[in-house]
Amino acid sequence: MHHFENVGLYDGLFVMQDTESKTFWNHMTGEALYGPQVGRVLGPIGNVLQITVDQSLAMGPDTRVAISDRPYFAAGERFGPDGVSASGARMAEGYAPANPDVRLSPMFTQTLGDEDTRLPRMTMGLALVTEATVRFYPMPAIEAADTVIDQIDGRSVVLYLDPTTFTPAAVFADTTSAAVDGPEIHRDGGRTVRDGVLYDATGTRLPTERPQQFFSRWYGVSLTFSDPEIYGR
């Protein structure tokens, strides 16, 4: 068993270190970067999805949810289990991960290696990662299309902007059309995606399989994975 903590930055990304062996680990790939555990990989890596508690319970009804009773402060306001402040709600409504004006702190930039300049450094997007393919889908492309149907390693995948969290997500789904309609993503044949779960035309829940995906900025993906593909190019 290992216990981990953030200890620094490398390629503009946080680096984990286990307190037992003092090895540095990449938090996206699970690979040991430096130290006695080099050559080993933590795994299998799960998907970290940006979801609400309701969505989490829809995906896994037996999920255990822990809610802290400790308040926290952000942007000079207090937040806690009693709900989000009014201005906090407005901030959420105005959330724009594709904001082209965001900048990276000098503390991060001084750790960057040789960057891939095919896209601006701070471009947000969803990276799909398989054993054979790494493909980056920029947020502007997902937002413009509403939903994206693509093929990766011979399998059909649907990318969409989640109507609840406004963040991109991807599921394997054999379909030729998809469109966001309120809280659902409608697919051909009356099938839907709701709260991250697939349903057939009768409302029966279907097995849901997701590709490995990272919601990240271009610099993080391109410095972690060698020569990733860019959707649409």
Image (cartoon, grey):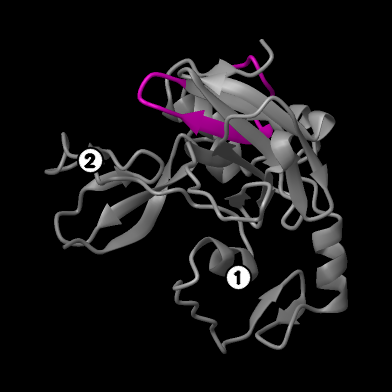
Give the x, y percent position of residue 89.
83, 69
103 shown above or below 80? above
Residue that lies at the very extreme toward the front in this rendered image:
202
Give the x, y percent position of residue 37.
14, 43
Count numbered badges in the picture.
2
User: In this rendering, would 233 be left or right of 77?
Assistant: left
Image quarter (top left, top right, bottom left or bottom right) of the C terminus? top right
Q: Residue at x 80, y 61 (%)?
A: 92
Give the x, y percent position of residue 130.
41, 27
The foreground one among 43 and 56 is 56
Q: Is residue 218 visible?
A: no
Q: Is residue 47 magenta?
A: no
Q: Residue at x 63, y 47 (%)?
A: 200
**Which residue is denoted by mark 2 in the rendering?**
41
Element marked by disc 1 = helix
Element marked by disc 2 = loop
63 shown above or below 225? below
Task: Give the amino acid at mark 2.
Answer: Val
